[in-house]
Image (cartoon, grey):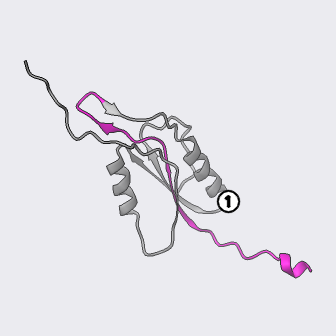
Amino acid sequence: MLAAFTLKPFHPRRFLVSAGPTFEPIDEVRRLTNFSTGRLGTRLANHLVAAGHEVVLLRSETAVAPVPVHAIRTIGFSTTDDLRRAFEALATAEPVVVLHAAAVGDYACGGVHVRRE
């Protein structure tokens, strides 16, 4: 009966974790964003590192949650395009678990209309 409950050998996995908000610029002074703090992704990253996994954290430059110091690498991003490029740069043929906790903006500004008299 105990043979059914034997533990399998532990194999650390590679994780990409995203955390925090994106913002989309409207013009030089305005932007669309959200209230994500980055807390969920930060806690996930810390928990995974504590469990012995290799973690790369993609963390918003505007996240306000306490900064983790445990990930093997932390990469900052601001816009949705920045985050996409970071994910693409980290893509490998090797398996990686992605935990996408960042709050990505739903909209981007296509232009600003200036009303003339």
> Looking at the picture, how far across and down is residue 73, in whole percent?
48, 55
Q: Which of 20 and 50 lies nearest the eye of the viewer?
A: 20
In terms of secondary structure, what is the magenta stretch mainly?
Answer: loop
20 lies left or right of 33: right
In magenta, the rendered stretch is 1-30
> Looking at the picture, how far across and down is residue 79, in whole percent?
34, 44
108 lies left or right of 4: left
Q: What's the residue at 40%, 63% (across, down)?
A: 90
**95 vs 40: above or below:** below
Q: What's the residue at 61%, 63% (across, down)?
A: 53
The image quadrant that residue 78 belongs to is top left
Q: Find the residue positioned furthest to the left.
A: 117
Quadrant housing the N terminus: bottom right
Q: What's the residue at 32%, 32% (across, down)?
A: 31
Residue 52 in the magenta stretch? The answer is no
Q: What's the residue at 23%, 30% (across, down)?
A: 28
> Looking at the picture, how far across and down is residue 51, in whole percent?
67, 59
The image quadrant that residue 27 belongs to is top left
Residue 18 in the magenta stretch? The answer is yes
Q: Which residue type does callout 1 highlight?
A: Ala
Q: Which of 109 and 92 lies nearest the eye of the viewer?
A: 109
5 lies left or right of 68: right
Q: Which of 79 and 92 lies nearest the eye of the viewer?
A: 79
Label 1, secondary structure: give it: loop
Residue wearing tag 1: 51
